[in-house]
Amino acid sequence: MRLRDSAGAPRARRDDSSQAPSEPVPHDGVRLQKVLANAGFGSRRACEALIAQGRVSVGGEVVQEQGVRVDPRTAVIHVDGRRVQLDEAKLTVALNKPRKVMSAMEDPQGRRTLEEFAARYPVRLYHVGRLDYETEGLLLLSNDGELTHRLTHPSFEVSKTYVCRFDCPGSFPRSILAKLRAGLELDDGPARADRASLVAHDGREAIVEVTLHEGRNRIVRRMFAALGYELTSLVRTRIGPVVLADLEPGATRELTRKELGTLMAEVGL
């Protein structure tokens, strides 16, 4: 069984080989409603209703008849257009990475790493992308290699949102937002925000929310540096459909079915 939210003390990782073997799949497959129920979509009766309403597809074809059998190891099933992750060995969790934590599983200098948080789960997790040492916020940990590859590959252009805080005495220059959206020339090429908006300004400091789909190293900090501003705080609040929300620094949680299905759809899975 997967472990759920783990904001408390880390749990020792169990070796994968110690887990009980999964139930063998019958030669003729498993009833679709049972597969959906095992995936967390409610009772079998509730899953039969989903099927009858035409909300379930298998291999791209809508299924409305009861009793259809599938192989959960290979079937591609969608509910309401979202892919259902059927491989229970795969796990993806959201972490609110605190400041001064390396986006790595080990560090020769002895600084805090992501291993501290990944060790809460009984499977080996790897970080999906990075946040720099001083940046906090949303970071995904996963053992799904294909999902990780697609989320980190620039061709899939998954959007990410950041909240940026910086000193800004006097009135707020609206040109900051226009220049972020128009694009800036950095030492490794141009960079442009998909969206940029002012969240707050009190005459001393400003808070700006920026969304972009690039993942180059320290790109948000470098964009503001190109405008003459040094960020005093940078927090990533969203990756695609996954939102940081009220997750406390250092806390983790397993992605919801909706989040995972939408995330998989965004990267063509």
Image: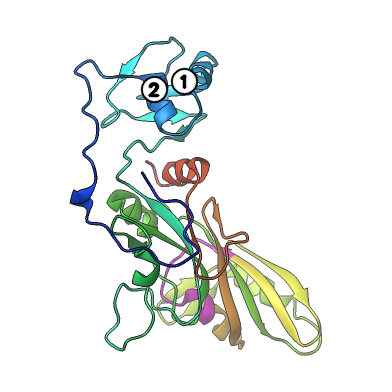
Please give the residue where the numbered disc 2 appears in the rendered image. 34
Horizontal side of 103 relative to 163 (left or right) equals: left
Q: Is residue 172 above or below residue 4?
A: below
Q: Quadrant of the image for the N terminus?
A: top left
Q: Residue at x 50, y 79 (%)?
A: 99
Q: Position of residue 259 (x, y in %)?
A: 51, 46
Give residue 52's mark.
none
Judge the density around disc 2: few (<14), some (14-19), many (≥20) Cα neighbours within 10 Å. many
Q: Is residue 147 magenta?
A: no
Spot occupied by residue 162 in the image (x, y as percentages of width and height): 58, 68
Q: Report the residue marked by disc 1.
A: 44
Q: At label 2, which amino acid type do we have?
A: Lys
Q: Residue at x 59, y 87 (%)?
A: 230
Per the image, is 215 magenta? yes
Task: Quadrant for the C terminus, please.
Answer: top left
Asked if the residue under mark 2 is in contact with the one under mark 1, i.e. CB atoms within 8 Å, the reply is: yes
Q: Position of residue 136 (x, y in %)?
A: 52, 74
Q: Position of residue 17 (x, y in %)?
A: 18, 50
Q: Quadrant of residue 124?
A: bottom left
Which residue sits at x=39%, y=28%? Answer: 77
Between 262 and 191, the residue placed more toward the observer is 262
- Decide if residue 124 is on the left or right side of residue 263: left
* Element assignment for label 2: helix
The residue depicted at 53 percent of the width and 17 percent of the height is 49
* Camera-side residue of 85 and 195: 85
In the rendered structure, which segment of residues is drawn in magenta?
A: 211-222
